């Protein structure tokens, strides 16, 4: 039986992919660093959204490095 993951909205996915497309080399495997970078590069209105986007960026960069 597959384990279900967290579902992300189109807003989160779209913004995250835009950030990775523009600033992909800047992001690391560290959530704390990515949180600061997301705040620097994007105008995110809430802390919760910023953290969700930073977490998704971190996850994508980790999976990209595994390949």
Image (cartoon, rainbow, N blue to C red):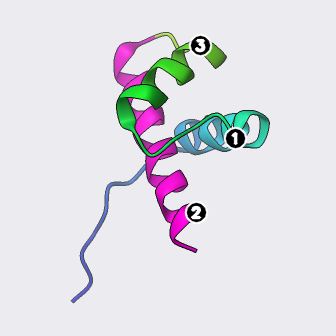
Asked whether residue 58 is drawn in magenta, I would say: yes
From the image, give the main secondary structure of the stretch colored magenta: helix
Instruction: Give the Cα separation between the discs numbered 1 and 3.
Output: 15 Å
The residue nearer to you, when weighing 10 against 29, is: 29
Q: Is residue 53 left or right of residue 41?
A: left
The residue nearer to you, when weighing 22 against 67, is: 67
Q: Which sits earlier in the primary sequence, circle 1 or circle 2?
A: 1
Q: As drawn, which residue projects farthest toward the bottom?
A: 1
Quarter of the image for the N terminus: give it.
bottom left
Q: Which mark is residue 40?
A: 3
Q: Residue 2, percent across and down? A: 27, 83
Secondary structure state at the residue bearing disc 3: helix
Secondary structure state at the residue bearing disc 1: loop
Q: Is residue 24 left or right of residue 47?
A: right
Q: For marks 1 and 3, give the one nearer the viewer.
A: 1
Looking at the rendering, the stretch of residues picked out in magenta corresponds to 46-67
| Above or below: residue 15 compared with residue 9 | above
Image point 34% across, 22% down: which residue?
48
Residue beneath label 2, please? 64
Q: Which mark is residue 25?
A: 1
Q: Is residue 48 left or right of residue 43?
A: left
Q: Residue 50, percent across and down? A: 44, 23
Q: Residue 57, percent across and down? A: 51, 43
The residue nearer to you, when weighing 1 against 40, is: 40
Q: Within 10 angstroms of label 3, few (less than 14), some, or many (20 or more) residues?
A: few
Quarter of the image for the C terminus: give it.
bottom right
């Amino acid at each position: 039986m597959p384990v279900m993951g967290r579902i992300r909205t189109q807003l989160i996915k779209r913004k995250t992919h835009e950030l990775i497309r523009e600033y992909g080399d800047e992001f690391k495997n560290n959530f704390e660093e990515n949180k600061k970078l997301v705040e620097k590069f994007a105008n995110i209105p809430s802390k919760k959204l910023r953290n969700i986007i930073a977490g998704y960026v971190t996850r994508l960069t980790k999976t990209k490095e595994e390949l």
